[in-house]
């Protein structure tokens, strides 16, 4: 698993959280989405999840509802569940267009609602509308300067444009507002890793698992970073945590292979050292 792949994997937690625009209008009555919309505008994410899951029983391929559910999962820190919505949101151009139209219409009706602005900012990137995403994230912040999620959204947009300093600034601002914000630490760690600031990346990733010790991908990054720094013991400990959490997953298999290689390298170094000490 190379550095770029790990970086993209970590950042993707937020990146779908950036998508919507012109296209197909809804084929269902607006009332079907009314309860979800009402809960979303008030930031009642548990209710958004409940109503979205209920509607998907009737309309399992409704991309708009999958998008709104992904947002709710993200806001509740349910990142694994969030990722399961991606295939529905990104399945075709028509779906992405419909999502953006719905988000734009929501902002037209509620232009001063910061969650509506945040949702639209989170939708534009899947259509490569970075400037519009920035505009709506910043508008959300104007309305609510303490909306940490919008700062993380801005960070991902700037990082995608390789403006690393700007990205770090916004991720740090989100953490100032919410010191327990996992996505901010995760994306900050990924940014530092991308920028070869390994010590800073480790600190961010360690803080992530301090808050939630069950995010498996973080242990992958930690293990690999510790190996780069020559600390095999800490690397193996991180890989062992992956195996504990997901022994049979792709990451679990990766961790087992990484441990075997680290131990083999350690044995080789020991043998080389003994050879060098011979008279």
Image (spheres, grey):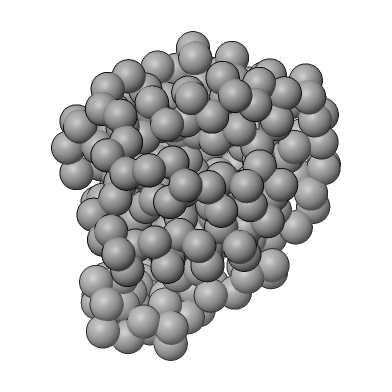
Q: Nearer the viewer, residue 99 or 55?
A: 55
Q: Is residue 54 shown to the viewer in this render?
A: yes
Residue drawn where x is 46% and y is 55% of the image:
69
Residue drawn where x is 80% and y is 30% of the image:
144
Q: Nearer the viewer, residue 106 or 243?
A: 106
Q: Nearer the viewer, residue 236 or 80?
A: 80
- Where, quadrant-wise, is the C terminus in this rendering? bottom left
Q: Percent from the top left, x then y, of residue 207?
A: 68, 60
Within the image, what quadrant is residue 175 found in? Answer: top right
Q: Nearer the viewer, residue 77 or 166?
A: 77
Q: Percent from the top left, x then y, of residue 170?
A: 68, 29
Within the image, what quadrant is residue 1 found in? Answer: bottom left
Within the image, what quadrant is residue 258 found in? Answer: bottom left
Q: Percent from the top left, x then y, of residue 181?
A: 70, 53
Q: Is residue 125 shown to the viewer in this render?
A: no
Q: Is residue 10 left or right of residue 198?
A: left
| Vertical order, 230 against 91 (above or below) | below
Residue drawn where x is 82% and y is 42% of the image:
177
């Amino acid at each position: 698993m190379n550095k770029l792949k790990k970086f993209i994997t970590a950042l993707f937690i937020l990146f779908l959280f950036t998508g919507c625009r012109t296209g197909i209008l809804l084929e269902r009555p607006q009332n079907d989405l009314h309860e979800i919309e009402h809960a979303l505008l008030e930031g009642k994410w548990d209710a958004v999840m409940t109503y979205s899951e209920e509607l998907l029983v009737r309309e399992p391929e409704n991309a708009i509802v999958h998008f709104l559910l992904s947002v709710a999962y993200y806001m509740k820190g349910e990142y694994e569940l969030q990722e399961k919505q991606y295939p529905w949101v990104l399945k075709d151009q028509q779906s992405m267009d419909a999502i953006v139209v719905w988000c734009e219409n929501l902002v037209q009706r509620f232009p001063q609602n910061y969650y509506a602005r945040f949702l639209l900012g989170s939708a534009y990137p899947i259509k490569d509308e970075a400037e519009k995403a920035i505009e709506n994230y910043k508008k959300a912040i104007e309305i609510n300067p303490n909306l940490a999620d919008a700062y993380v959204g801005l960070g991902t947009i700037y990082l995608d444009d390789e403006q690393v300093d700007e990205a770090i600034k916004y991720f740090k601002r989100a953490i100032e507002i919410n010191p327990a914000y996992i996505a901010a630490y995760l994306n900050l760690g990924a940014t530092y890793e991308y920028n070869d600031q390994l010590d800073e990346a480790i600190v961010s990733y360690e803080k992530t698992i301090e808050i939630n010790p069950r995010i498996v991908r973080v242990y992958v990054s930690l293990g690999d970073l510790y190996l780069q720094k020559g600390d095999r013991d800490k690397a193996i400990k991180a890989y062992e945590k992956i195996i504990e959490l997901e022994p049979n997953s792709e990451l679990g298999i990766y961790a087992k292979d990484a441990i075997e290689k680290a131990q083999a390298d350690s044995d080789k170094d020991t043998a080389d050292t003994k050879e060098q000490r011979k008279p």
